[in-house]
Image (spheres, helix red, strand yellow):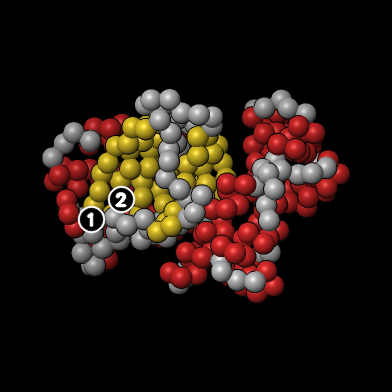
Amino acid sequence: MKASPEQLDNAKDGSFLFRQFTLPYFDAPYHFHPEFELTLILKSEGKRFVGNQVADFQEGDLVLLGPNVPHCWKNDGIGVENSARSIVVQFKDDFLGEAFFKNPETQPVKMLLEKAKAGIHITGKTRDRVAREMIFLLTVPPFQKLLGLLDLLNTVAISKDYEIIDSHSEKYDLSPIDLDRINKVYAYVIEHYTQEVHLETAAHLANMTETAFCRYFKKITQKTFLDLVTEFRIKHACNLLTSTDKQVAEVCFESGFGNISHFNKQFKVVTGYSPLHYRKMFLATI
């Protein structure tokens, strides 16, 4: 899987895009684009990747992403006809003119869009209301869609039913060349982190020698390539520990680690807890 910029033709049909997708599975690769994106999952489940954050998603998942935040949704298992459905709204920050969000009345939405640069997961009653409205807006004329979009954004902006997905959003403030290069590497890791991941392959994707790539990757992301792989594996393990009753050994190997001792050590470095303690804490909050 190769990360790539997604080209959107906003000028063809209007100042923003409002689309519904019905697919056997979500097939968009790990990608990024300069538009904001509001995505509602109507049907499907699997893993959602935003930046270097990985989380489970299911029906009702609602996310607002800012410009150039790399992302993708990957289904669990093999899809069948109509098994993956979503509504996606995409718009640029100036789709209503450069000065529109400078008006006093639009300040809550402006602040929301700033937060969206780190990705926002919308939850609770706000999610339910926005989801219903997005479904309704599929069938209305363009002007009503426009008014509806503004209302959706304001609804989220004045609520407290959302959480930041990736607080380390400053890494997306890169040149287009650096962003494309780094996201090719992220895409490779996302596709293979539960298996073997090779530094040589990552360096090749960045068109660099291994030594140059290691220096470059650390400078751009403030972490080593191995750190990135370990983070994805630990987050995958956390999901397995809290959503299944699999033994720690099973979780270890399914998350891409080669032995339990190394897994336990790395898990504690990243989370501060042993795998079993982490699971017990989660169960205690249910």
Q: Which residue lies furthest to the right in this view?
A: 261
Residue appearing at x 16%, y 51% in the figure: 13
Q: Name the residue under label 2.
A: 90
Give amino acid for label 1. Asn
Instruction: Label 1, secondary structure: give it.
Output: helix
Lower position in the chain sequence, tag 1 or tag 2: 1
Residue drawn at 36 percent across, 55 percent down: 6
- The label nearer to you, 1 versus 2, is 1
Query: Which image quadrant for residue 167?
Result: bottom right
Report which residue position mark 1 lands on.
10
From the top left corner, tell me how far across and down residue 276 is, in percent: 79, 35
Above or below for 158 versus 175: above
The image shows residue 84 at horizontal and vertical percentages of 40, 31
Q: Is mark 2 on a helix, strand or loop?
A: strand
Of 18 and 107, which appears nearest the observer?
18
- Asked if residue 131 shows in the view, the reply is no
Q: Do the residues labelled 1 and 2 touch (CB within 8 Å)?
A: yes
Q: Which of 166 and 114 is in front in this view?
A: 166
Q: Is residue 35 left or right of residue 257?
A: left
Q: Quadrant of residue 185?
A: bottom right
| Residue 24 in view in this figure | yes
Left or right for 219, reference 136? right
Q: Which percent across, then down, holds residue 42?
A: 38, 31
Q: How far apart are the alpha carbons under marks 1 and 2?
A: 9 Å
- Is residue 262 toward the left or the right of residue 106 in the image? right
